[in-house]
Structures are given as structure tokens and as C-alpha cells.
Amino acid sequence: AEYLDRLRRTEPQLRSFLHVSQTAMREAGEVDRLVESGAELGPLTGVLVAVKDNICTADMPSTGGSRILGSYRPAFDATAVRRLREAGAIIVGKTNLDEFGMGSTTEGSGFQVTTNPWDVSRVPGGSSGGSAAAVSARQCVVSLGSDTGGSVRQPASFCGVVGMKPTYGRVSRFGLMAYASSLDVIGCFGSSVVDTAILLSAISGHDRLDATSSKHEVSDYAPQLVSLDHLESKPLKGLRVGVIRETTGEGVDVGVMSSVQAAASHLEQLGSIVTEVSLPSFSLGLPAYYILASSEASSNLSRYDGVRYGYQAAADELSSLYGDSRANGFGPEVKMRILMGTYALSAGYYDAYYKRAQQVRTLVRKSFKDALDKNDILISPAAPSAAYKIGEKTNDPLAMYAGDIMTVNVNLAGLPALVVPCGFVEGGPAGLPVGLQMIGAAFHEEKLLRVGHIFE
Ligand code: GLN
């Protein structure tokens, strides 16, 4: 009830939700009765979870932040949502995002702009800005987001919360609206690593409804964290940490860099061996990501034709029905991505763009593999700057894309990465949070969570 009260009070200013459940209050009330009755409780019984609005929920609208789905109500829950309900969670509402996950500020929503709880004149990051802001402002306990190129990690960094991007295939994508299917994953936000770990355990695992979901065993991530590690003076003894050289140079704010360096020294004091490591193809990741993500998006978004789902324009001919529904339903960023994607995939340009981007993807994978053969985890800033002002980058999409440099490579390689708050820079009424990104080998979520836990 405390969370729901706060939600009601803060929402007019934050606007992190597109829809708030009408039944959450009642469900929360029932929890007390359930506890008193001595019934067996799930790992998330009574926990208020917010869900990004590109993840389908049967009892609430699911718009993907797009006007084209303004009236869409799915007939089913996404697998991750179904698992949350089975674990006892209460879905408190659906959070705002950049349309279909395309953006880094949440300003690209078809409905509203979400503000950053640390400074309401700034963006919360994106595209899962609503989910990050909701946890940061304690409007809910934990939340789900999605991460195609950084959309969980960068808003976690901007809002000062924990954000986990799992290994590709760790969490079922069934019911997640596809943006770029070979990169998309559902991820978790929490105000602590333990909360995030509990949420991740609840949603992970194989699902026959998603052919790319992995059969790799799911461990219960949280209990491992509450180990005696903390009581030893060198709990990270022998942990090999590589600082990614390409993320520490030009273009990174000084304050961000010094927070990350302080985090590296902290890891060293706790016994880890910190060295610098180079990922030679790092800077190629950004253009490759934007070509691949836009190409996949142009194909995935062809399903929104005004017939199958959501908004339909009034038209007397089929071709104008398709055309007008898409012209009126999609926002400008989405249209730009579709144009970029169809261009990159077109016969005359395929070799020059799409194919080369796939080749870069192979190089990126290989350079991560080499670096992670020599190191247990890699670290970098989660974003080159702290949260910036609303409107600052709206007319400069390239500047916005450039801000994704720290995160996109991880999606190209399909690896897990955890962001934890590691410091502050000046700005806003109380300083602005900075996030540390830790990257691990595939399915090494547990290791990342264990190291992240040390920061709390
Ligand atoms: N900002 C990136 C993009 O616009 C990442 C988005 C995401 O991870 N969904 O594509």
C-alpha cells in the first residue's frame, strides 16, 4: 500500500506509467489474508512488479509505446509475466518506453515523456525509462524492461538503480513485442542486487513458446549472494577483472570516468586482479548495431498493417489502408528505422551494409570471447554521461545513438551484463547517479550478481 500511495503521489510528475492496474490495491490487500491463512507463499508473493509496455499482459493494454497499438489488448500474458504471476507477484501497471524500444530517452513514446526522479528536468534514459524511473522512485519494488542495445542498462545508470541484461535466450521472449529478434532480451530492474536476482530467477528458463530460449539450467540466483563472502577481507580474491580500454577514452565524461575508476580500485582492494583489456572491434559495434537492429525492425514491424492489430485508418482501398494506418500510427523515429532497415536490406546495398554489419558482429563476438577467456568479468561505464536534459538530443538522433556505445556490443555478442550504481556526478538537486557495467561470459549471471552485490 505504501508503494501504491507513493505511485499515486509521484506519478503526475514522473509519468512513468502508461497504465496502472485497477486491481493491484485489492490484490495487495489479499496478501495479508494469504499470509495469515498460513498458505504456501511464492518467492514473489505480494511483490509489486511494473512491466514495460512492450511486454504483453492479458489484463491490461499493451501498446509498445506506439499509437498504432493504442487500443491493443493481448489475449495472453508474456511467458515472463505468467511466471511472475505464478511466483505470486502483483503486476502494478505498464511502464512508458520509446516506441517499440527504439530510443535512449523515453521521449520517443507515442504518449508521454517520463522524467528522471533525480531531476525532473532530465530524461530517465531509455528505452525502458518508465521501468527504471518507477523503481528509482519506489513506485514499485522491481520491474521488467527489455534490452536490445542497452535499454535496461542505460536507464538503470541514469536513474541510479540496478539493471540486469541476461544472456540472450536466458529469458523467454514470448510476448515481448519484437524489435530486433536476434538482440532482444527481457531484463530486470531492482533497487538492490538481491531483488534483481530474485526477479531474474523467477522469469528465467526454457520455454517451448520461444525457440531461441535456452535449456541451460537456471540457478536460484539470490541465495548465492547471501554467502559469507562479505565477511572475508578479500572476498574477490583471484577474480580477474578487465577494464575495457576502448570505453575509457575520449567522449566519456570526466565524472563518469572517475566513478568507474573508483569502482575498479574498490574491486582491487577486495582482492581482484584488475588489468586493462582491448576489444579492437569495439567502435565498429555501434554502426553495425544500428544497421542490424533497423534491418530486423523493418521486417518485424511489417506485421502492423492496420488489419491484424490495433489502429486502423479509414480508407477505401487496401493499399491506402495499409499506408495510412502505418503513416498515422508510427512515430517519426520508428519510420526512420524502417527506412534505414529496408535500405540496408535492399538488393543493391545488402552486401555493403547488412552483410558487413554481420561480419562485424562476428568480430565483436570473437573479441569478447578472447577477452573473457583471460578475464572473469569486463567492466566499463554503462553510459558515457549521466542523465541529460529533456529535449537536449531530440533534434540530433546521431548524438543519441552515440550514447549507446557502451552497451550495444554486449547485445551483438548475446552476453549478460549487470549495471550497478557506482557514484555520482554533479547536477540536479542532489547529484546524478553513474552506473558501472559488468559483462560476463554467456550464462554467468550468477558471477555478475555476486560481484555486484559487493557494491551494496
Ligand atoms: N537505444 C537503442 C536503440 O534505440 C537501444 C534500444 C533498446 O535496447 N531497446 O536501438
Image (spheres, grey):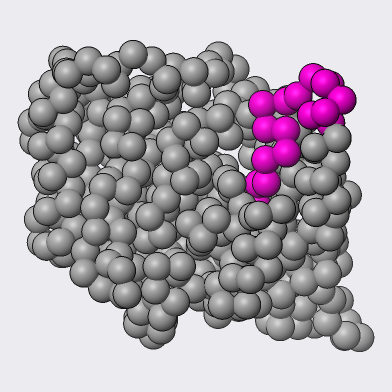
**Is residue 46 part of the magenta span, yes or no?**
yes
Nearer the observer, 109 or 272 = 272
Q: Residue furthest front?
A: 36
Residue 264 relative to residue 167: left or right: left
Residue 202 position (above or below residue 289) = above
Residue 218 relative to residue 45: left or right: left
Residue 415 position (above or below residue 376) = below
At horizontal 61% and vertical 52% (from top left) the residue drawn is 140
Nearer the observer, 240 or 221 = 221
Which residues, given as a range, are shown in magenta? 34-50
- Residue 308 point in image, percent of width and height: 85, 61
Residue 61 position (above or below residue 12) = above
Nearer the observer, 438 or 452 = 452
At horizontal 15% and vertical 35% (from top left) the residue drawn is 266
At horizontal 78% and vertical 46% (from top left) the residue drawn is 28
Total marks shown come to 0
